[in-house]
Every structure is written in structure tokens, then in C-alpha cells.
Image (cartoon, rainbow, N blue to C red):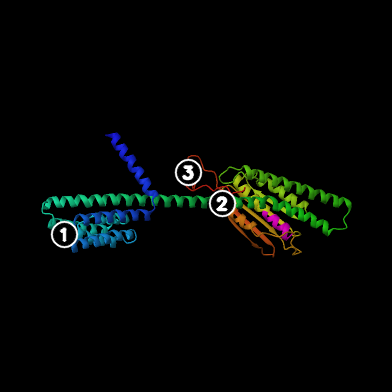
């Protein structure tokens, strides 16, 4: 029994695959020819048993019921009603079976049930009036089984097609979403590269431009001064190239999901080197550090980037202006970073600015839950000020405030 079921299932699968390969119009032609042959064969068998006029009617109605099947996909309801009338006249249900099957595939709603009920009533009444060899119960059961089989098979085919269409649409949607995520990942990677390159190279390039500007201004400087300045330019350029090589190398091998390994993590301790490099370049920078304790690495890194970007802007736009860098804060209070410069003597700019440095700083500060402000100070200079939250350590046995909050994510490109 199992082998018979398996063989029947295999035959059905082969027939379904073959049917799927045949074009819809080819199937329509096949249905039209089969129904037409059945109708004409029935009319030919009636020859001699009916009047010539009735045979002519059977032929004409049979041809009409077969030909209208060509439009069964576009107008399933109308074709079903036409074939119902033809079946009521000729008593041949072939065209009606195909039309009702198509309607069950196309729609499974109240219209299908209403038309099926109408077909059922017409079939029972016509059979009861023309075939006196069957009683009413047999006619009722036969019609019920017939229309139930047609509806069940058509509904199964329609539901299967809807499922395949839904799965195909879901697959296409998933593919489009995957491509969109890939595009977003590429844009995010470009943003990470641009931000890291800006942070690492802009400061060093601004120092080189500052030293070169000093040589240009002091054209009559002695050989020792020129040699010392050239050495500083060479050293700064080599450091910039080393930073560039390190950043590109890490970008090629970085597998971290948030890009936290893009570069070494500078902190509060390295801010002194930034200030000293600016002093060597001829900018009067005063560093005041009033930080109690050691802030977390993410806060130290963010403070370093704020000072680095601020000094870079001073090098570009206010190279002769005195600058003050103020760091203050403690656990439970927060970390405050302020960089303020006086009004520059000259409005000339050494290097063009992209205008995205402070925007990138805003993103960094927001990632750690801080606030960043910049603008003109009261004396006409420029001021960049940031407040970074520095939570106090939780006491033993007590739940720290905000323990259920999401911890800040380390900024990309740090």
C-alpha cells in the first residue's frame, strides 16, 4: 500500500512539474480543445435521437462553452456563469468544471460560495427533470460530491500558488533588505574611515602647516632656526605617515562589530603631548588639569579627541591666538573639557576646513551620554565646552543608579 501511494505521489509531482513548464496559454488551448471535443462528441452521439435543430443548438452551445474558456483567467466569474448556462442547456458539465475550478483557484470568498450554490441548485434541478432513473437523494449526494471535489482541488491549487507567491515575495524582500544592510555597512565603514583619518591626520597636518607658515613669515631666520623647524616638520610628517599606516592596517584587519579597535586608545595622560606639540609649533597653549582620579577609558578617549580637534581648529583658523585647555571633574560629578582661544590677530586660514570636525565630536560625546557646546566666547574668541558623565562606583550590596540602562557604546573609530 505504501509503495502504491509513493508511486502515485511521484506521478503527481512529475505531472505538476510538467504542467508548470507548459505556458498558461498552452494550457488554455488544451482545455478549449478537450472541452470542444467532448461537446461535439456528445452532439454527434445525439444524432438520430433528437431533431436536427436541437443537434445544431448542442453544437453551437458546445462551441461557445469551449471557446469562452480562453478568457477564464481574466474573467473567471463571467466565464463560470456562461458555462453554467451552457451546461444547463446541454447537460455537459465539462466546461463548467474547468471554469469553476479556475474560479476556486482565483478567489475563495463569498462569490465562490454563491456561484457554487447556484451551480449546485441548477445541476440538481436539471438532473431531476431529465434523469428519472435516479431518486432525489442520489442526485443530491452525487452533485454534492462532484462540486465538493472541484472546489477542494481548485482551492488547494490556489492556496499552494498563493503560498509560493508569498514565499517568493518574502525571499525578494529579504534579498532587498540584505542589500540595504550591506549598503548601510559600507556607508558606516566609510564614515568610520573618514572619522578616524580626520582625527589622526588633521592635527599632524595642521602642525606641519603651522611650522611651514613660521618659516614663510620668518624668511630671514638663521640657519639654525631653519634647520630646527625643518627637523620638526620632518618629524611631524613621519609621525603622520606612521599614524596613517597604522590606521589603514587596522582598518584592513578590524573584525570588531563596532570598530572599537581602529586605533590605539589615547586618554587624559596623552593630552599633555598634544599641548606640547602645539607649543613647539608656536601656539601659546596653557593646560590646566584639575581632574581627581582616573576617568574610564571611554571618557579619557573622548576628552582627548575634543582637545585634539579644538587645537586643530586653532592651528587652522587662529594660529597666533592664546589658548587655554581646562580639564576638571571627579567621580560622581562628571568630566568637563573646555578649550578657549582669544581673538586671532590674523583672519587668514592655513588649511581648508571640512566643517565636519565638530559634528563628529558631537556624535562622540552623544555616544557617552554627554553634551557638547561651541561658539563665540564673551571676549570675541572661540570656545568649545563639553560635559561628560562620570558615574560614581556603586557601593557594595547596593544597586547602582541606572543599572538597568544600556551602557554607552564606545564610539566608532576610537
Residue 353: horizontal and vertical position, in percent?
A: 69, 59
Numbered mark located on residue 399 in the image: 3
Residue 164: horizontal and vertical position, in percent?
A: 38, 49
| The N terminus: image quadrant | top left
Q: In this view, does 10 lie to the left or right of 82?
A: right
Query: Is 215 one of the magenta-colored residues?
Result: no
Residue 131: horizontal and vertical position, in percent?
A: 13, 54
Residue depicted at 20% across the width and 54% down the height: 45
Can you identify the residue that label 1 sits on? 50
Main structural element of the magenta stretch: helix, strand or loop? helix
Q: Which of marks 3 and 2 is in front?
A: 2
Asked if labels 3 and 1 touch by Cβ distance under 8 angstroms, the answer is: no
Instruction: Give the residue at the far front of this rendering.
Output: 48
- Which contiguous range is marked in magenta? 309-318
Numbered mark located on residue 343 in the image: none
Query: Is 316 one of the magenta-colored residues?
Result: yes
Amino acid at each position: 500500500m505504501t509503495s502504491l501511494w509513493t508511486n502515485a505521489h511521484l506521478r503527481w509531482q512529475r505531472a505538476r512539474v510538467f504542467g508548470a513548464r507548459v505556458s498558461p496559454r498552452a494550457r488554455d488551448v488544451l482545455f478549449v480543445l478537450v472541452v470542444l471535443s467532448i461537446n461535439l462528441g456528445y452532439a454527434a452521439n445525439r444524432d438520430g435521437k433528437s431533431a436536427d435543430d436541437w443537434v445544431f443548438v448542442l453544437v453551437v452551445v458546445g462551441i461557445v462553452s469551449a471557446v469562452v474558456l480562453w478568457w477564464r483567467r481574466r474573467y473567471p466569474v463571467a466565464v463560470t456563469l456562461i458555462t453554467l448556462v451552457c451546461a444547463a442547456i446541454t447537460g455537459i458539465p465539462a466546461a463548467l468544471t474547468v471554469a469553476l475550478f479556475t474560479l476556486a483557484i482565483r478567489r475563495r470568498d463569498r462569490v465562490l460560495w454563491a456561484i457554487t450554490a447556484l451551480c449546485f441548485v441548477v445541476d440538481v434541478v436539471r438532473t431531476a427533470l431529465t434523469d428519472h432513473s435516479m431518486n432525489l437523494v442520489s442526485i443530491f449526494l452525487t452533485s454534492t460530491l462532484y462540486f465538493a471535489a472541484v472546489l477542494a482541488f481548485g482551492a488547494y491549487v490556489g492556496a499552494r500558488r498563493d503560498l509560493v507567491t508569498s514565499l517568493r515575495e518574502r525571499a525578494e524582500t529579504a534579498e532587498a533588505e540584505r542589500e540595504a544592510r550591506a549598503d548601510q555597512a559600507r556607508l558606516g565603514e566609510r564614515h568610520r574611515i573618514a572619522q578616524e583619518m580626520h582625527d589622526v591626520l588633521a592635527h599632524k597636518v595642521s602642525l606641519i602647516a603651522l611650522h611651514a607658515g613660521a618659516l614663510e613669515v620668518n624668511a630671514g631666520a638663521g640657519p639654525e632656526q631653519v634647520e630646527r623647524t625643518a627637523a620638526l616638520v620632518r618629524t611631524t610628517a613621519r609621525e603622520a605617515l606612521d599614524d596613517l599606516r597604522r590606521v589603514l592596517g587596522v582598518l584592513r584587519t578590524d573584525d570588531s562589530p563596532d570598530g572599537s579597535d581602529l586605533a590605539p586608545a589615547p586618554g587624559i595622560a596623552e593630552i599633555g603631548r598634544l599641548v606640547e606639540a602645539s607649543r613647539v609649533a608656536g601656539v601659546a597653549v596653557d593646560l590646566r588639569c584639575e581632574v581627581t582620579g582616573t576617568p574610564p577609558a571611554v571618557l579619557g578617549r573622548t576628552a582627548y579627541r575634543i582637545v585634539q580637534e579644538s587645537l586643530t581648529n586653532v592651528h587652522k583658523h587662529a594660529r597666533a591666538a592664546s589658548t587655554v585647555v581646562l580639564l576638571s571633574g571627579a567621580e560622581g560629578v562628571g568630566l568637563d573639557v573646555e578649550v578657549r582661544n582669544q581673538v586671532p590677530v590674523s583672519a587668514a586660514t592655513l588649511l581648508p576646513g571640512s566643517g565636519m570636525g565638530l559634528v563628529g565630536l558631537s556624535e562622540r560625546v552623544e555616544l557617552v551620554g554627554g553634551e557638547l557646546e561651541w561658539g563665540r566666547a564673551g571676549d570675541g574668541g572661540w570656545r568649545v565646552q563639553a560635559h561628560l558623565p562620570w558615574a560614581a562606583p556603586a557601593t557594595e550590596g547596593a544597586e547602582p543608579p541606572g543599572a538597568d540602562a544600556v551602557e554607552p557604546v564606545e564610539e566608532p573609530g576610537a
